[in-house]
Image (spheres, rainbow, N blue to C red):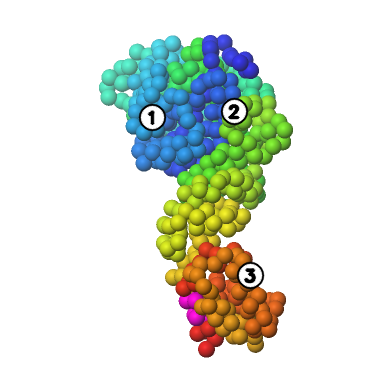
Amino acid sequence: MSVTLNPGFTEVRTRFAPSPTGYLHVGGARSALFNLLFAKHNNGKFILRIEDTDQARSTEESLKMMIQDMVWLGLNWDEGVDPVTLKDMGAYAPYRQSQRLDIYKKVADELIANGKAYYCFMTDEELEAERARVKAINQNAHVESPYEMWTLDQAKAELAKGKTAVVRFRTKHLRKDYLLNDLIRGEVRFPSDMVGDFVLLRSDGMPVYNFCCVVDDYMMKISHVLRAEEHLPNTLRQLMIYEGMNWPTPQFGHISLVLDDDRQKLSKRKGAVACDQFMKDGYLPEALNNFMALLGWSHPEGKEIFSMDEMIKLFTLDRVNASGAVFDRVKFKWMNAQYLRAQDSQTIWNQVKPYLVAAGIHLPKEAGDAAWQMKSVETFKPKLEILTDAVALYQSLDDSKFEISDESNEALGWEPTKAVLTTWKNQIEAHATETFTEADFVAIENAVKTGANVKGKNLFMPIRVAVIGKPHGTEVKLLVPLMTKQSLLTRVNKVLAKLG
């Protein structure tokens, strides 16, 4: 094993603990990936835990979406919610916080019994008045509860009357610095007076994030907590709880935020940020994993393209950078193109076909033939960066979508154009078979060149308009072998009709 475990731990165990309140953000997916890579590199376990105590925002639909995204990415977990049945799998169930309320209550009771926490009966009005009072004295002062000095018997008497209370953790007596040796950021010092007496359980019995997070990490034997740097301020409260319960503390590593190219937090204002949207747009999961791995981590040899197995073999935290990682969308698309074009033609066809069907693309009847499919993929592969690019490329073969663009007007206005198109039509009609090879196209183009006595752009631009409806685009000699005689005649007749 290449890592040293804190006392109280026997194996590397990491976790990803999302809240099912929406899509899986690429920042969350990157955290999940790093936790999986770290665990697997050290022969450990990767756990998926669901933090769904926010009942108003957590939904089963969001949970299913997040799990679907993780399965798509291949971020397979050893314990947690089963990806198919959503039932628990593992020795430390339940893995949904909403099903662990009795556990949190038991720990809170223990803290209260040991004098580390207390019941606070302050009303909302009293809290607001106290906040106003301390703010007037000192901006950094903390709310003080009059119930902090009550005995447990006094508090229980109030509860017996039907009063409701939150449970607060006592902090004033601590008066020391908490030292965190962050695995990514180095030494971080937290003065205990950064926080006041903080809430563990709300009055309705629901735990707050910092409390249930610690309880779950301890109960599930999490040895390493790798999470986004925005959680760094939470660490002080969590260290206090670990200490209050005399529990072994895991090692923490806070990963940099994922930033847009303006170095602000990644936002959907700039484009997709959800794994679900990347999947719909036609990105490959292997490419997304590869790209996410480089958001804050670097390959020892500086490589940019590498497999999941290679990531697992090489991933260490000493190569994780503490500074923000920029999500370069242009580079991501380039990387996806490398993965996409490296696949065999049959695999690419199987992947693009659903997009063509969804877009209502009507292809020639020859498209049912495997040879045509492979030829079409080889034709378009150099232009594919993401799978949805196939829609625009294959659309050029759909007669029902053939339109003569306004950018064709200049070429259609040239004096030799009508002769070029008429000769082109005659050559197509005279062709002996219904289909064409690239050599057939070259021969026909040469015949048009001779018959209409034109060359250069006066030759090939009008022909391109007759084939794809615009003077610029995919090379016609590559497209024509994918088309039929009838299709080409239908198109050139439309262009000639436009010329009158």
Classify mark 3: residues with Cα within 10 Å, few (<14), some (14-19) or many (20+): few
Mark-to-mark CA distance, 2 and 3: 51 Å
Considering the image in quadrants, where does the N terminus appear? top right
Which disc, if any, is residue 82?
1
**Residue 92, picture quadrant:** top left
Q: Tag 2: residue type?
A: Ile
Q: Nearer the viewer, residue 271 or 230?
A: 271
Classify mark 2: residues with Cα within 10 Å, few (<14), some (14-19) or many (20+): some
The residue identified by callout 2 is 312
Q: Nearer the viewer, residue 421 or 348?
A: 421
The residue identified by callout 3 is 442
Position of residue 390 measured from the top left corner of the image (x, y, whole percent): 52, 57
Among numbered discs 3 and 1, the one appearing first in the sequence: 1
Point 51% across, 73% down: residue? 432
Position of residue 324 measured from the top left corner of the image (x, y, whole percent): 65, 39
Relative vertical location of residue 305 with respect to residue 435 in this rendering, above or below: above
Position of residue 362 measured from the top left corner of the image (x, y, whole percent): 43, 64
